[in-house]
Amino acid sequence: MGADVNVVAASESGCHIFGHGCGFEAPGVGLFSPTPWLDFGLPGAAGVNKYYLVAAVALIIAAAFWYFTTRRAKVVPGRGQSMAEMLVGFLRDQVTRTTMGKEGDRFLPLIVTLFLFIFCMNIMGLIPGLQLPVTTSLAFPAVLALFVFLLWNIVGIRRHGFGGHIKARLVPGGVPAWILPIVVPIEALSNFVIRPATHMIRLFATMFAGHLLLALFAAAGFYMFNPLSQMGALYGALSVGYSAIALVGFLVFTAFELFIMAVQAYVFVLLTSIYLGEAIEGAH
């Protein structure tokens, strides 16, 4: 199942509904703070923990996908090659060319790589034994967003020069000069602070909340499963029914969460492409 095994620890120790009176303890943010395997003792550093493992697995899965789908590329593609070509074609037609035109084709390898890597990091929350989306650690979305932010500035400066890029980002076209003292600080805050922050937080917050809800369904299902309740057979049957409802909710939300994982990867690369398109276009 997609929830961390730690969330069912209380239930496995004998704490169930219609039991000895112990209450349900919902999973909390501790799910996202795995015990470090190697702690360097640095302030604010989490050390080497499970996130490193799941990030490495996500990278291997992404690399393996391209290796096994394209190692024997043919004019008439097989199933694997068709999947890879469909992914590239979708991102080209729906992301890069819609935001940058034909010029966006040179950024297509980057967009495809980002999408697949982010999606693989997201689905780590559904893989048994790992069950921890890499993107629920703020550090990973932050690094990706910072990379996009730096690339956005590099592309804009190379195309329009430092002054031209900064002016395009701070001075909207057609704004009267008398209002610029108000508009320029707002544009600076929006483009150079809020933009990279929201690019990072959107991915992190969505995956964080989704995994927490999955863990809640899983923990509730274990807590409510008590067929041998000391309160009698009727309560035991009720507990099984409640647990079945939680299980159905878990399965439905797992499917929905898989869809959200793909959507969040798509949104991240779509925004990346939009930002790069703005840097290429310059003044607006």
Image: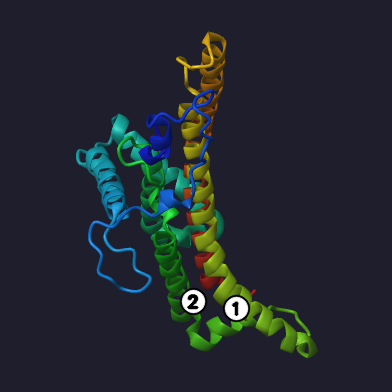
The image quarter containing residue 235 is top right
Find residue 50 and report its horizontal and vertical position in percent: 30, 51
Query: Which of the labelled discs sits on residue 126, or is there none?
Result: none
Query: Disc 2 marks which residue?
Result: 156
N-term mark: 1 or 2:
2
Query: Which of the labelled discs sits on residue 169, or is there none?
Result: 1
Given the current orientation, which residue lies at the most extreme left position?
A: 72
Q: Tell me which residue sits at (43%, 77%) in the image.
A: 154
Q: Tell me which residue sits at (25%, 69%) in the image.
A: 40
Amino acid type, callout 1: Arg
Quarter of the image that includes the C terminus: bottom right
Total labels drawn: 2
159 up-or-down from 267: above or below: below
Find residue 85 and report its horizontal and vertical position in percent: 36, 40
Look at the image and tell me whether residue 282 can be seen: yes
Q: Which residue is more in the foreground, 96 or 179?
A: 179
Q: Which residue is more in the foreground, 226 or 184?
A: 226
User: In the drawing, does residue 59 fall left or right of residue 140?
Assistant: left
Given the current orientation, which residue lies at the most extreme top position?
A: 233
Find residue 60 and report its horizontal and vertical position in percent: 25, 47
The image quarter containing residue 108 is bottom left
Please, what secondary structure does the residue beneath circle 2 have?
helix
Residue contact between numbered discs 1 and 2, judged by CB atoms under 8 Å: yes
